[in-house]
Every structure is written in structure tokens, then in C-alpha cells.
Amino acid sequence: MMERRGFVLGSVASALMGCANAPNEAVPVIPGALVVGGCDLSLVFEGEPPNLPRSAYEGWVRTSAQMITDYYGGAFPVPGLEVTVVPSGRGGVGFGSHRQGRWIRVRCGRGTQQRSLDRDWVMVHEMLHATFPDLTDQHRWMQEGLSTYAEKLVRIRAGNITEQGMWSRLSGSMHHGRPRAGDRGLAKTHTWGRTYWGGALFWMVADVDIRVQTKNRKSLDDVLHYVASIGGNARQMWEPQRVCEAADKGTGTRAVSELYERMAEAPGDVDLDRFWADLGIIRVDEDSVRFDDDAPLAYVRRGIATG
């Protein structure tokens, strides 16, 4: 999730306000202690680290950044990020926010365990926001949807989630993104479901369309790599048309721009039952799926998992 109003606590607020001793000021870590893919990661806490030692949180940040670095071919798309951990409640990893390709905040409960950090998706989600151009609030769905879908691509390529786990989650939640009565398109209907899962549906369908048109030679990976190669990250403000143009140029197709017309400017729907069947994804129960390798687009499903 992206933070639009700025942070009110910690070292970020202190820097913005020019105040060296702001209330609740976070304790900084010396820059350079965590460098991954050319990105200088500063880890700070608002108070004492919750439950686990500082080294556990450093490992969590480093591992998440390394997964994204590997996905992008060896370089993290922004030169630096300040990651603030906010102790909150008793549970594990909670709500996260991102701002301007420079700052990330994530809440962690006092009861956070190492396994929560090892299985976490929130840090990857927020770091992905930093790698993609900023857009106006009207097009927030494009950013949130990308992080919601691509987070799973990053993690499966790193072996942090299984193929079954990825498709179980997507097939169990993607229906939240479909348009309902009165919907006017993703760019005009800003509900929670349409912003997060509607945006994820857009990027998942785009990924499949690109792969079908290019016989698995191009994909969403190429979209994001090309955007990064021309300096597109959250420190830059883009229009959605520029995103579409870059996506088309990076893949040699018009898959993204044509899908934008169908799903952003109009309430284009997706027959998910047919979509899953074509990919060879069969839900067994709420928590598991099985695969049909004879399905017409099974090769696309496998390509999404392997890159």
C-alpha cells in the first residue's frame, strides 16, 4: 500500500521537518550497512525492535530486497530506501505503506516470530511499489494491482512460495477484482476490491495475453524490466498512457494498451472460470489447487512460475 500523506513519526518526519529531536524519533542504522543490488537500505525502528533481535529484521529486509534484485536481473531499481519497522500490537507482520520510492513503513507485532518474516509478502509488496512509476490517485489501482500480482512472481522465482501456493491464493481472491453493477472501469471505480484485486486482475490477464501472443517469449517481466531500464520508478511521476506505451514497446505487443481500453476505461470483465480452466488450474478446496497439464494454456501457467 502507498502512503499519500507522508509519515508523521520517526526519522523520515524528522528529516522532512529539519528537526533533529522530533518526538518518537526512530533510531537510525548507519547507511551502507545493508546494500543489495546497489540499493542502500537503512533500517530504523520506532522504539525497541519487537520481540526478535535487530539482526532478524535486517535479514528480512535484505532477503526481500534480494528477491526483487534477482527478479530485475541484478540491480534494485532505486538507489536507496529507508525501511521503518513500527512495533504495533501482538501479532506478526501487519500493515505496510510506501512513499515516493524512498520510504517504507511496516508494522510488526510484539509476537512476531522468525517464520512470520520468512513467509512474509508485505515487505516485497511495498518494495515493489518503489520499483514502479508513481501515478495519480485515479490510477492507484495500476500500482496496487501490480504489487499484489507481481509480489507472487518475485517470491515464486526465489522459491519463497510454491506454485500451488501462488495459484491457490490468486484463484481464491481474484474474484474480488471483477466489476459489479454500476462499475465504470478501473480508472473510475475506486473500491478496495477494484483497486487491489481489480488491478491485480488487469496485470495477470496482461501477463497471460503477452505470453500467448509471443508464445511465452515475452511477459510482464519484460514490461517491468523495460520500465526500469528507462528510469521508471516511484521517484518519477508518469501518466498511465506512458506505462502502456512502455509496456507495449518492451514486449512488442499491444496487449497492455488494449487491455487498458477494455478494463480501465470500461468495466471489462473476465470469465475467471474459463480463465482458470484454460491455464489448467482446478480448485480442490479453499486452500489448495491441482493442475491439468493438458489444458490449452498450461504452458503459460508453467512459464509464469519459472520465468
Image (tube, rainbow, N blue to C red):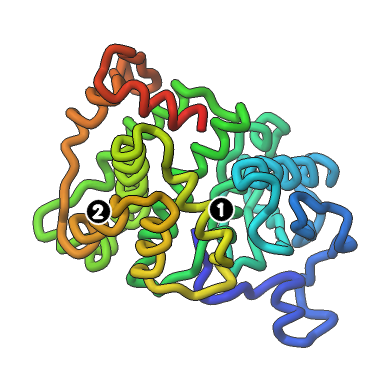
Residue behind mark 1: 128
> Where is residue 15 shown, x and y percent of the image?
76, 80
Q: CA distance from mark 2 to mark 1?
A: 22 Å
Could you tell whether 232 is left or right of 180 in the image? right
> Where is residue 171 shown, x and y percent of the image?
32, 31
Above or below, comparing residue 233 to residue 17 in the picture: above
Amino acid under label 1?
Answer: Leu
For image coordinates 80% across by 46% down, the residue present is: 58
Note whether residue 297 is visible.
yes
Tally the marks: 2
> Where is residue 135 shown, x and y percent of the image?
43, 71
159 or 71, nearer to the observer = 71
For image coordinates 56% across by 41% down, the residue present is: 121
> Which of the two discs, 2 and 1, labels the residue nearer the N terminus?
1
Above or below, comparing residue 152 to residue 224 in the picture: above
Residue behind mark 2: 259
90 or 81, nearer to the observer = 81
